[in-house]
Structures are given as C-alpha cells and as structure tokens.
Amino acid sequence: MAPLEGDTLMNNTSEIFHIFESSDSQNFMPSQGFSGVEGEPVAVQMSAPPEFAWTRLLGTSAWDQALALTTGSDGSIYVAGYTDGDLDGQTNSGAADAFISRFHPDGTQDWTRLLGSGEYDVASALTTGLDGSIYVAGYTDGDLNGQTNSGEWDAFISRFQPDGTKAWTRLLGTSAWDQALALTTGSDGSIYVAGYTDGDLDGQTNSGEGDAFISRFQPDGTKAWTRLLGTSNFDVANALTTGSDGSIYVAGYTDGDLDGQINSGDADAFISRFQPDGTQDWTRLLGTWGPDYASALTTGSDGSIYVAGETMGNLDGQTRSGFYAEFDAFISRFQPDGTQDWTRLLGSGEYEGASALTTGSDGSIYVAGWTGGNLDGQINSGMADGFISRFQPDGTKDWTRLLGSGEADVPRALTTGSDGSIYVAGETTGDLDGQTNSGGGDAFISRLIVDGTDTPERPEIHQVINWDSFPPQITGVLPTENQGSITQPLPNQWFGTDHHDVIIGTASDETLLGFQGDDWLQVSQGNNTLFGGQGNDILVAGQGDDILLGNKDDDILFGGDGNDAIYGGQGNDTLVAGNGNQILFGDQGNDILFGGTQGVDTLVGGEGNDTLVMLPGEGYSMVTDFQVNQDMVVLLGSPDDYEIGSLPSGFHSGTAIYVAGSDQLVGVLEGVTNVSLEDGNIFGWG
C-alpha cells in the first residue's frame, strides 16, 4: 500500500522524514542529523494508526452513557456509566441508574448490573482491586443500597466480585453536593476515591464554594481518612493514579490559588501528590489566561506521571490551534518530585478535549477525547468525533485515530487490556462502527488492536478463581487436556506458543513452558517445573514438590500438596501456598503472598510494596524480608483476634503472632520488633 501524504517514517536510527506525495516508492532528502546520500534507499518503518477490532453499543430508547473502564485481573473488561432505561433486561429503579457491565476481549458481554435508588444515580469511575474485586464510584441523590443519603448529592463507592455479585456500598456525603469522579487502587490494596464536595466532608472544613476531596478506603469498606483541597473558589478533583512508589496523584481544576500556587486566570488545572497516610507532598498548577481543566491521569512504566485535559490558552509555550472560544486538548508529563518535563497540545482549530489516559504494555501513552475538526490529518465524520492518540514518553506523537458516526461521539474512558489492546468507552448519538443506536444516546465500548496484539484469546476454560475464600481457590471443572498448538520436544516436556495456551501435565516430573501469551499451566502429580514466560499466566501445582516460575507480567501461582517453591518474577503477582512447607518469593513488583494453613511457609516479598497474608491453621508463615512502611501483613478478623507472643525456638529476633488466648502460632516477622497489632502501617485486616 502506498504511504500517505504527511505520514511520518523513521529509519532504524530514528531519523524522521515526511512524505509529500502518494507513491509506492520514495526518494528522501537527508534531514538534519542524517548522513545518508540524497536519493539513497533507506530501511524505514511506518507508525500508522491501528484499526478497531470491534465496537459494542449498550443502549435503551433513552439516554445511556459510559464514563469509566477498568481491566480485571483475568483480562475481562468492565465498563460503567448510567442509563435512563431498562438496560440489558435490568429494570431501572427511577430517574437514572448507574450500571456496570463485564466484557471479554472478543467483545462477548457477560453481565450487566444496575445500581439505583429511585432517584438519579451515576457511575463515574472504576478500578480493580488487588484481589480481583471491581470497585465502582459515582454519585446519587437517593438512598442507595440501604445507605441513607445525607442530602442533595452523595458520593458512593461499591465493591463487586468478578461474577457480578455486589459486596457492599458506602456513601460519602454532607447536606450539600458531593460527587465521586475518580478511583485508583493503592499498592497495598487500599482504594482511593476523589471528587468534590460543597460541604464539610468527614469533619474537614470546606474552604469556599466547593473543595476537591480524596478519601482512602480499605477493601472491606472501612474508611481510613479524607482530605480536602480547596480555595475560597471552586475546586474539583477529576482523576487519580497510583505512582510506582505507592504515592497517590490527584488532578482536576481550581478557580483559586491552591496550596500557595498562583492561579494564572480563570480556572487552572492542578496535580497534587499524596502519601498513603494522607500527607500531601506538593501541588502544581497548569494554567493560561483562560480556563484549563485536567481530566485524566496515568502512571508511565518509568514512574512518570501524565495528566491530560483541555486548555483555551497557549499552555506551557505551546500555541493553541483555535480561535478565542475553542479549546485544545493537552497532555503533560511530570516527574514524581513535581518537575514538569513537557506539554503537547492536540488541536484542529475547532473544539478538542482530552478525557482519558492509559499506559500501553510497551510504555506508550494513549490519550483519548473528542474533536470537532480534522485532527492530525484524520477526517472528521461530522459534529464531534472521538480520537485516540499515541505518544512516546519523550512527547513524540506516533499517530491519531478518529472514531465517528456523523453524530456526536465522545470517549470518556480508556484502559489497557492484558494482551496490550486498548479499550475506549463513551457515548454516541449515532450508529457507530456499524452498530445501530437504540435511541437517544448509547454507551459504547471499542477495542483497538495495537502493534500485533490481535492474538487468539485463551482457549475456553471453565475455572473460576474464588477470591472471597482465604486463600483463594479454583472452582469449576478443571482442564484435562492441552488446548492450543502445544509441542513436545522431548519426553515429559510440553512447550506452548506465542499465543494463549492451556498446558496440562498428566505424568510425573514434567516441564511445562508457556512462552508468550496468557497461559494456564497445570500439573497433577510428581515433581514438576512450570514456567509461565511472558504474559499474565496462571500456574497450578499438584501433588509433589513442584517449582513454579511466573517470570514476566502479572501472574497467579497456586501451590499444591508438597514442598513447592513458588517464584513470581517481574510484575504484580499473586502467590498462594498449598499444603506443605512451601517457599513463596514475590521478587519484583507489588505482590500478594498467601501463606497456607498446613505446613511452615516462607514468605519473601522481594522488591515492591508487597501484601503478606497469614492464615491460622495447622502451621504458620515466616516473613523474612518485611519492610516497614512498604509492605503490609494482612490477617483475617480484627486486632482483638490475635496477640503478640514469644518467639519459637530457632528465631533470634522478630515478632510472633498468635491466635488470641491460645498457643496457635499464625506467623513470624523476622527482624521486626516493637510491633503493635494496631499499627496500620504494618497490619491490615480482611
């Protein structure tokens, strides 16, 4: 296919050329920094906009809007928003209900749940918990799920299991307006929610017309703290993200001088950093003479923080493309210490706004929003089109892709799938991507295939990981045979492919290698070695002394019956001990390690902010590298159920934890002394 006019090509030493005529072959004038000869052929690669794999509409004859996305621990995609009608056979409770729906990567829809009070209820944010639970937040002006509204609008947060079961709902409210607009999951499993309040929320005094707020919750729904960010004017928090060091970043806009930072005029975008205990580190404003709004945040793979939104001025020296009344979308990069690296504007001369960000599996940054014009050479379908643009961490823009129906199409959310695909959701008033609108406005979700991520889905399996049990358990019919193009290079060796495989060992002393893709590796007996490779893998040991290695990405590893060695490797892994004396080593990433209930298990978190779960039973867990103010020990129940006791023989220093009023040892923290069970920096409760 001929290159297109204006396409950017890069050779293997990153020189940049522009094509000015459509042709299957091109001669290039050497640009600055390129030592080639005029007219000499060079090897180039094109960074072209990718295509959409599918689009699904969720709609009724009334108005339906998607506002949030998240990716589940099993690769499922969750979308949330609100509906004015009876969506997917669910009966609306009143004026408008919040909804949450689950999709598979192939576009198959699993279920939809409505949350309604009989009044107006909106879901505006989603996040995935470390245990696989799904948290949704928003606002309601009614009594939601048995929780009493404080007056006007209340913010809410609800927890769901992956099967759609609702665990709990909490309201945050004053007698005035309170709305939750953002969620993120902390490295220790805490849930952070942000938005704005017109009142004195949780005993915090409001500074003026309306303050931004951020609150921290435990997975069981217990609220830890609330902080307000405010001036005497209007202040709103629209976005949250968690830094690689566990810090929490919040962004939005302010009409005043926030935290000693001088407003540039009208509304300024802001970004602030908090510690998990609620301590605020710094605030930065991004502003021009006109209104500037921050709507989205994401954390880069290198720890940088990206913020996006819209501006009516020349932000950070970047020239706006439109006239007086038009906005440009913007994206800016910050370092964790608050240093700003760069800002880029996206504009067509019409109205643009950025509403969502996500970080790709390769470290690229994706920004989505809407445009009223022809953006980056892409032709608008009419009215407003959605756009997705990809940036490199240095601010280089790779491509822009529009999504339009000829009517109004507005993306509101982005997430990155476990296979690297990019998902976008929002609302459309037209027939989008061949899908017929049900009337009014429909919510939509689309999958964008990026750089060869359109790999086959994992073969169908019928297991469910029950995260409500401690430790988690696999339920359902277990696989009994291989699925995928599995090879056997040598006896007792089974190798997967670069796609998603199911490899089942049936003999003894086998070696199973998943390679790339999201694989399921399982053995039944003997002393086996399971190696996940790249991808988000599930490894299941059997009877015998097995070795499980997750390697890269976010893996789930289950020990079996025997003295197993379980290694997470890179990524945020979940390691579950079985029955026996087992060694669990999280290694890099923010890992969760579940000690077993039989045998003496050794838990080694490694690098990162790790969660170490100790369970009472016929054995105990030893934690050998606990880092105070970094790692967390989780126990079932409350501090009243346990007590600190004497160390068993063989331990020279540490803390021993017993079931209260008994000699049943639950766990030992080696090298950690002078500990109180009430210390929230060390202990969490499930």
Image: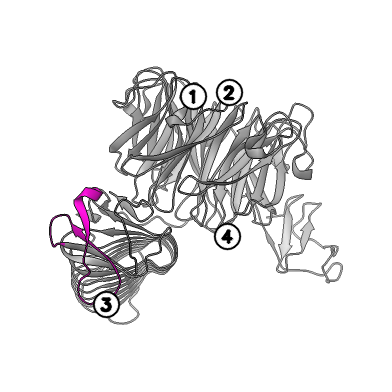
Q: Label 2 to label 1, Cα distance in Å?
A: 9 Å
Magenta stretch encompasses residue 254: no
Say which of marks 4 and 1 sits in front.
Answer: 1
Q: Label 2 to label 4, Cα distance in Å?
A: 38 Å
What is the three-letter code of the residue carrying label 3?
Glu
* Picture quadrant of residue 628: bottom left
Answer above or below: position of 171 versus 393.
Answer: above
State yes or no: discs 3 and 4 in contact (Cβ < 8 Å).
Answer: no
- The reply to whether residue 204 is in sight is yes
Q: Report the side of 653 relative to 199 (left or right).
A: left
Q: Quadrant of the N terminus?
A: bottom right
The earlier-in-sequence mark between 2 and 4 is 2
Disc 2 crowd, CA 10 A, few/some/many (<14, 14-19, 20+): some
- Per the image, the residue denoted by label 3 is 510
Disc 4 crowd, CA 10 A, few/some/many (<14, 14-19, 20+): few
- Per the image, the residue denoted by label 1 is 199
